Image (tube, grey):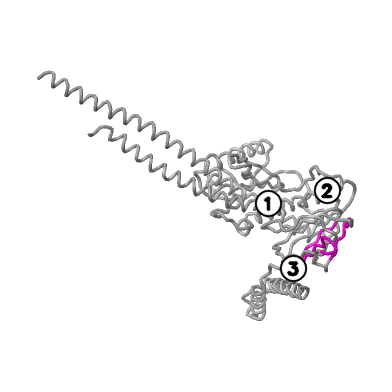
Amino acid sequence: MAVGKEIRTQISSIKNTQKITRAMEMVAASKMRKTKERMEATRPYSKKISQIIKHLAHANPEYKHPFLVEREVKRVGVIVISSDRGLCGGLNSNLFRKTLKQFTQWDGDNIEVDICTIGGKSASFFSRLETNLVGQAAKLGDSPHLQDVIGVIKVMLDAYHAGTIDELHIMYNEFVNTMTQAPTVEKLLPVVATELETDDLKGYWDYLYEPDAKEVLDNLLTRYIESIVYQGLVENNACEQAARMVAMKSASDNAGNLIDELQLVYNKARQAAITQEISEIVAGAAAV
Amino acid sequence: MAMTVHVDIVSAEKEIFSGLAEMVFAPAELGEVGISPRHAPLISKLNPGEVRVKVSDTETQEYFVSGGLLEVQPHLVTVLADTAIRAKDIDEAAALEAKAKAEEALSDKSGKIDYATAQAQLAVAMMQLRALDRLKKRGS
């Protein structure tokens, strides 16, 4: 019977798509667990180093490291971290929207922007726009190494040292939970004093530095930036997998709904064809 | 009870120690330092070596670090280790091999290898072995 041939092919093609999305969902789920573990493993380090930097911002050092001194802002550097691959819902586009909003604001203040991208999607997005792309790193895989991003960071830090940029920001997706990823903008440089939980550090004090302030602070601050960027990267990675899992789950569900609807249409058409055939036979018999 | 100070030791991979201690010893760049509670604020680079945490009179924990940073606040000591491992987890064979490799690299003066890197590797391997030796002596 030739009824609903198109519907049947459509159903089978949707079924194939559903198989793919379901497989991607499961892959993303298992990858998410791994990336999440990695993210949680590196969190203590970046938390502690942020804490030290926070303390440092409250000290009154004799030696003023350039990273701790605010200056008039004419040009800012931005590191945008995105995923390498797509098919992860609105993850990247949400981040880019937030980034562009920030850019428009800077544009209004006549501040120029230099961009470094980490991840393939941001590279292709920002190279299409008229922006100053000064560095990029892509194809870092699911277990990125610090070495992979040091180059990008160095470009920015050198620019900051040279006075080309006066602020450094980082934009990435923060992992809140599996369902929620929050696009985040963080200011890395200059380091500014923020509110502290304790009163211990009020008053006038400074660290003892070994071997000397410049060397230690250089080392510490570079390491701080590296660890924050790296943390952003692993966090973004976990976000990517979580977002992909959710996106693929809803794609699979949608495919299921479509199949159900088409199946219903197909059954109705088939039933109608049978009924018609019967009534034709009956009419034929009655005519004889 | 004796005065204590909160100690955190973290490496890039994980949190290694977090808790109260009576005293902390660390291999600062200008020589080993012992930190008691209420020490003045201090920031120092660390050499490869052992970080010892005296938890109580009877208990001392040892960790091996291959470099890093130390921050001291009156009530808080933070060690940011490049890599930190419990001293007893050091693999002796691996340490010996690393030492041999570094020495070999150092003696090969053909100029192809990075002298400074080799020296740093050697220092790390030597310190690991030293930490092991000390651990063994105490054990026997």
Residue closest to the far left: A288
| Chain letter for mark 1 | A
Residue A255 screen position, x and y as percent: 42, 37
Up the image or down, A265 lies above or below B63; here it is above
Q: CA distance from mark 1 to mark 3?
A: 23 Å
Q: Is residue B50 left or right of residue A138?
A: right
Disc 3: CA contacts within 10 A as few (<14), some (14-19) or many (>=20):
many
Disc 2: CA contacts within 10 A as few (<14), some (14-19) or many (>=20):
some
- Mark 2 element type: helix
What residue range appears in magenta?
B33-58
| Chain letter for mark 2 | A
Residue at 78% x, 73% y is B138
- Mark 3 element type: strand
In terms of depth relative to the viewer, which is nearer, B109 or A43?
A: A43
Visible residue check, residue A211 = no
Residue B40 screen position, x and y as percent: 88, 57
Q: Which mark is residue A58?
A: 2
From the viewer's perspective, is the residue at label 2 or at label 1 nearer?
1
Residue denoted by label 1: A43
The answer to whether residue B78 is magenta is: no
Quadrant housing the C terminus of chain B: bottom right
Q: CA distance from mark 2 to mark 1?
A: 23 Å
Residue denoted by label 3: B48
Up the image or down, A103 lies above or below A141; here it is above
